[in-house]
Image (spheres, rainbow, N blue to C red):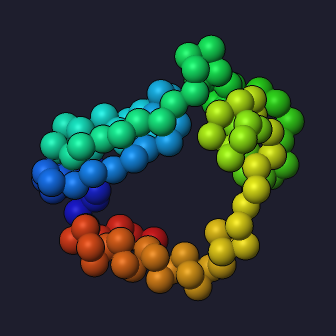
Amino acid sequence: MSWTTQNLPSQRGKTVLITGANTGIGFHTALELARKEAHVGALTNIPAQGALPTLFAATDVVDMGGYYGPDGQGEVNGYPAPAYMDPYAQDANLGKDLWEYAQEETKIKFPL
């Protein structure tokens, strides 16, 4: 079975906070969770900056495997720039453990 938003179980009673919810995957994640009755809090940039990360990634010269985000305080808003990547984000064993945990909690299996 492949995963689709139709496989997502009800999220009633759950609260989620989505960053970057005005464009791209953040927007679609917030939308689908709301459709499944989650209470969604959305953090967004001002509209003039909302599409900048997508445009930056699509049109600028970036480092392969680089991580980019807003350059403002706390990397919550601002213009696209190289962002801080915690060493835990590059830990393959931790990633595997989190992947398995997510599958157990959601009851959805994702093939690797």
Residue drawn at x 48%, y 36% is 43
Residue drawn at x 65%, y 33% is 77
Residue drawn at x 73%, y 61% is 85
Q: Is residue 57 visible?
A: no
- Residue 56 pos. (x, y %): 74, 29
- Residue 10 pos. (x, y %): 13, 53
Q: Say which quadrant the N terminus sits in.
A: bottom left
Q: Nearer the viewer, residue 58 or 27?
A: 27
Q: Nearer the viewer, residue 102 or 44?
A: 44
Place residue 92 in its image quadrant. Answer: bottom right
Residue drawn at x 73%, y 37% is 72
- Residue 94 pos. (x, y %): 56, 81
Vertical arrangement, residue 11 with respect to residue 90, above or below: above
- Residue 16 pos. (x, y %): 33, 50
Looking at this rendering, what residue extends furthest in the top direction? 48
Indicate left or right for 88 with 103 as reference.
right
Q: Is residue 47 visible?
A: yes
Looking at this rendering, what residue extends furthest in the front direction? 73
Q: Nearer the viewer, residue 12 or 64?
A: 12
Place residue 9 in its image quadrant. Answer: bottom left
Q: Say which quadrant the C terminus sits in.
A: bottom left
